Image: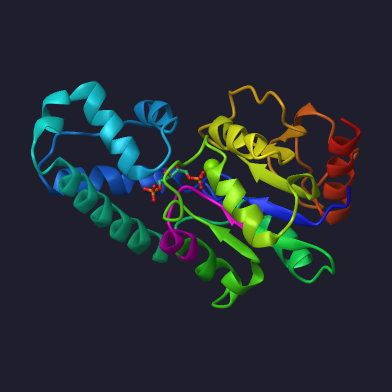
């Protein structure tokens, strides 16, 4: 199978954004006088539920079930999440979060490479993707991508395959011609359920997990002067991930 596209997850993969998401949730709760405060440890557990609104509902179900009986609960969660999103975007505009090692380098290389398409598959929103990428890579960065699948486009978020299937339909490619880059178990499950070979780069919240079915598990994409650490699998003998490295890793998927 040829290697024709890279599909990037966003949170945890392009950048370590989850601490900003967590701060934005906590700040929103505090502004409304709710004594809900998500510690780092709790947030690590809550990340198993993807999507901010779904995560809030799950938290309330498990800790404050009475709140869910409020007749206005759906509107309340929606309003809190809108406020959290606005806060997140303000925090991101302050430039708190750099792209992870190798991300800018690989995106620049791939956007100009003939025969390679780029895509995004994320449970967060379009606005949040722009809030991360535009300050880091410039106003036209969203044009680098041939497909954009965000949490606003599907009902069933990760680990369901829907976000990846939607990205594939925009790319017009079979899953085996693509390679997904993910940082989480739910993300890996979503991509593999869509039939897409997947490389994992672990993030702050996900480094202690197991990734069955991943082509390889790396600390990050690495840089020429700062190799990645190989955590599991076979990374084709490379020390940093560029397109030729991804081709080698992708070829292994074809060989099973
Ligand atoms: C990770 C997520 C998101 C964010 C919060 O997304 O699970 O829910 O934590 O974003 P990714 P929202 O698929 O990019 O790893 O509050 O906008 O849902
Ligand atoms: Mg992620």
- Residue 5's x, y, as percent? 75, 56
Q: Is residue 222 visible?
A: no
- Residue 58's x, y, as percent? 30, 30
Q: Is residue 65 left or right of residue 148?
A: left
Give the tally of numbered discs: 0
Q: Quarter for ligand 2? A: top right
Q: Is residue 82 left or right of residue 124?
A: left
Q: Is residue 124 left or right of residue 249?
A: left
- Residue 199's x, y, as percent? 72, 39
Image quadrant holding the C terminus, namely: top right
The residue positioned 13% from the left and 38% from the top of the image is 34
* Figure quadrant of residue 114: bottom right
In magenta stretch: residue 127:
yes
Q: Is residue 5 above or below residue 197?
A: below
Q: Is residue 148 above or below residue 222?
A: below
Magenta-drawn segment: 120-130
The residue positioned 19% from the left and 44% from the top of the image is 74
* Figure quadrant of residue 30: top left
- Residue 249's x, y, as percent? 85, 41
In magenta stretch: residue 125:
yes
The residue positioned 84% from the left and 43% from the top of the image is 250
Q: Is residue 199 visible?
A: yes
* Figure quadrant of residue 145: bottom right
């Amino acid at each position: 199978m040829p290697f024709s596209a890279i599909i990037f997850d966003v949170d945890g993969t392009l950048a370590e954004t989850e601490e900003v998401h967590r701060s934005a949730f906590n700040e929103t709760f505090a502004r409304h006088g709710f004594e809900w405060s998500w510690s780092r440890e709790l947030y690590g557990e809550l990340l198993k539920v993807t999507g901010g609104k779904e995560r809030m509902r799950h938290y309330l179900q498990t800790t404050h079930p009475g709140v869910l009986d409020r007749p206005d609960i759906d509107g309340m969660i929606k309003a809190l999440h809108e406020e959290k999103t606005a806060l997140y975007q303000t925090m991101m505009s302050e430039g708190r979060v750099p792209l992870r090692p190798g991300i800018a380098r690989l995106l620049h290389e791939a956007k100009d490479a003939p025969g390679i398409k780029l895509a995004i598959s994320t449970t967060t929103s379009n606005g949040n993707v722009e809030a991360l990428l535009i300050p880091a890579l410039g106003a036209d960065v969203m044009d680098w991508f041939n497909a954009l699948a965000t949490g606003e486009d599907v009902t069933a978020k990760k680990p369901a395959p829907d976000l990846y299937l939607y990205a594939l339909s925009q790319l017009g490619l079979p899953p085996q011609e693509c390679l997904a880059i993910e940082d989480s178990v739910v993300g890996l499950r979503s991509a593999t359920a869509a039939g897409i070979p997947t490389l994992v780069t672990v993030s702050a919240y996900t480094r202690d997990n197991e990734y069955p079915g991943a082509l390889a598990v790396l600390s990050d994409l690495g840089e020429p002067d700062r190799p990645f650490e190989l955590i599991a699998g076979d990374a084709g003998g490379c020390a940093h991930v560029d397109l030729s490295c991804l081709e080698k890793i992708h070829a292994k998927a074809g060989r099973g």
